[in-house]
Amino acid sequence: GINPSGLPCGNPPPFTREAELYCKVGCLGQKGRQNPTEELKMKYNHNKNLVKNAKVLRKDMTKEERHLWYDYLRNKDVRFLRQKIIGSYIVDFYCAKANLVIELDGSQHYEDKGIKYDAERTKFLEQNGLTVVRIPNNEINRNFDGVCEYLDSVLKSRCRTGD
């Protein structure tokens, strides 16, 4: 059938046209595996070199990360982790129940180097059964309620709960 949202994963359109185009990249993981494998679980625990950096990132969250964490994610019925090490990467937010990674993207993610790096990260995460949702920082600032509604719909489709 026709996908009215225009997004590959069938999620409702996010907050603005600019964000919709950007989020399309991260929605492709829905066609991947639905459950993390034992191999992926092992990767979570193996890059000890990133532990110190992840702790610093948790302590020094950006304004947008703090807003999304304290005003939305930490109060969800599903558990989210901040600055989770997955393989050789540290993701902003991770939900095991939904096999979901949420990345908040500042301006550096729109430069050529950032775009290439993000594509490599996303490919790795998706190959390991995770769905990656990328949200521009300016959407957190401009349309926080819309971002939360979008994430609610993603969570509902991923783990049959959104509250």
Image: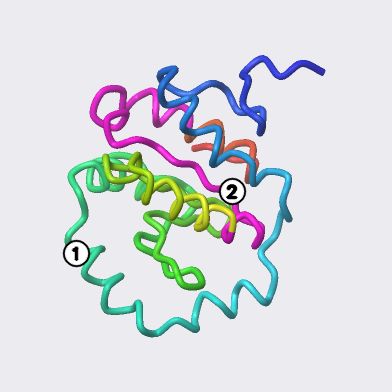
Q: Magenta stretch?
A: 124-150
* Residue 127 at x, y percent in the picture: 66, 59
Quarter of the image with the N terminus in it: top right
82 inside magenta stretch: no
Pointer 2 or 1: first along the chain: 1
Residue for badge 2: 131
Q: Is residue 110 left or right of residue 94?
A: left
Mark 2 or 1: the one toward you: 2
Identify the amino acid type marked 2.
Answer: Thr
**How many C-alpha atoms fall within 10 Å of the one at disc 1: few (<14), some, or many (≥20)?**
few
Q: Residue shown at 48%/25% (left/top)?
A: 20
Give the prevailing secondary structure in the magenta stretch. Answer: helix
Q: CA distance from mark 2 to mark 1?
A: 25 Å
125 inside magenta stretch: yes
Q: Residue shown at 46%/32% (left/top)?
A: 22
Residue for badge 1: 59
* Residue 116 at x, y percent in the picture: 46, 50
Identify the amino acid type marked 1.
Answer: Lys
State the residue lying farthest toward the front. Answer: 112
